[in-house]
Image: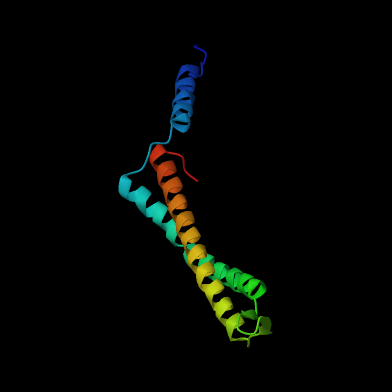
Amino acid sequence: MTRYRPKRNLLTIAALAVACVVAMPAYAQSESECRARAEREAYGSGRVLGGAAAGAATGAAIGAVVSNDRHYNRRYDRYYDRRSDKRRKDVRKGAAIGAVVGGTAGAVRNSQAYNRVYDDCMAGRYR
């Protein structure tokens, strides 16, 4: 009577095949898939509008603080106080400048996020 011998060679080959499949490097996706992934990451977050709103608020605050209501009158060689219209204009100017700067910064962050995600995807590094 012959003794049963387990087929260890077959089990070893199967385990080695599974290990190779699991350890294979991740290949890059197609260009269109990476572009779609990068657009979802970059443009779905609303960084431009958020940056513009934060910049407008900061610019308005700085415009209100820096505004000078005093005006020098050369004719009478003295200072006098202006009405609050100048302060209001300075606040509006500061808000406009802050909105432009904040929106630009948000657009730059969007572009950087797009490039980072696209490059990672094309290189096969997934997040």
Residue 65 located left or right of residue 33: right
Q: Position of residue 49 (x, y in %)?
A: 49, 68
Residue 60 located left or right of residue 110: right
Q: Position of residue 37 (x, y in %)?
A: 40, 52
**Farthest residue, direction top:** 1
**103 vs 6: above or below:** below
Q: Position of residue 21 (x, y in %)?
A: 43, 31
Q: Residue at x 46, y 39 (%)?
A: 125
Q: Quick check: can you spot residue 46?
A: no
Q: In the picture, residue 76 is in which quadrant?
A: bottom right
Residue 43 located left or right of residue 89: left
Q: Residue at x 56, y 72 (%)?
A: 94
Q: Residue at x 44, y 26 (%)?
A: 17
Q: Position of residue 117 (x, y in %)?
A: 44, 47
Residue closest to the eye, 39 or 127: 39
Q: Residue at x 48, y 28 (%)?
A: 19
